[in-house]
Amino acid sequence: MARVPGVRHVVLCTTDGLLKARSGGLARDDAERLAARCTAMLSLGRDQAASHGTGEPVVRQVMVQHDGGCLFLRGAAAGTALAVITGEDINPGLIAQEMQLMVLRLGEATLSTPSRGAGGVG
């Protein structure tokens, strides 16, 4: 993901808030706080999907756009999520595509983490 224009940081975390990996340049404390925020955002997404979606409450992607950049979040495997922090000048479609490719490259077996809580990202 580091080669994608505009990507600042990448974090791999469990859906119950534990940091699994982080890109260089992102302090561990900041990465752990991001992992915790990702848990909250995924929970809100699941609630939204349960209330207004069809079928299972699966969160495919969450994007938060703010002054200075964006946060992209998606499920990576059972109990695991991938978060990408970007600058403002980005191609959102390219970011989403590269996130999907990263998930596929890492593989389900590598990313799968048993969740401590109920209702992981599907």
Image (tube, grey):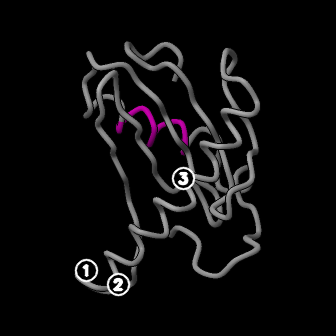
Please tell me whether mark 2 sits on a helix, a strand or a loop.
helix
Q: Nearer the viewer, mark 1 or mark 3?
A: 3
Closer to us: 68 or 6? 68
Range shown magenta? 96-103
Residue for point 30% across, 33% down: 66
Spatial separation of the CA atoms under disc 1 and disc 3: 20 Å
Mark 1 highlights which residue? 53
On screen, 35 above or below 98?
below
On screen, 26 above or below 56?
above
Q: Tell whether position 102 is magenta.
A: yes
| Residue type of the residue flagged with mark 1 | Gly
Check if mark 2's residue and mark 1's residue have beta carbons within 8 Å: yes
Q: Tell whether position 70 is magenta.
A: no
Q: Quadrant of residue 10?
A: top right
Please tell me whether mark 1 sits on a helix, a strand or a loop.
loop
| Residue type of the residue flagged with mark 3 | Cys
Please tell me whether mark 3 sits on a helix, a strand or a loop.
helix
| Residue type of the residue flagged with mark 2 | Ala
Spatial separation of the CA atoms under disc 2 and disc 3: 18 Å
Q: Position of residue 74 (x, y in %)?
A: 46, 51
Closer to us: 111 or 104? 111
- Considering the whole magenta stretch, tell me its main secondary structure: helix
Closer to us: 21 or 36? 36
For the image, the number of numbered tags is 3
Check if mark 1's residue and mark 3's residue have beta carbons within 8 Å: no
Q: Position of residue 117 (x, y in %)?
A: 70, 77
Mark 2 highlights which residue? 50
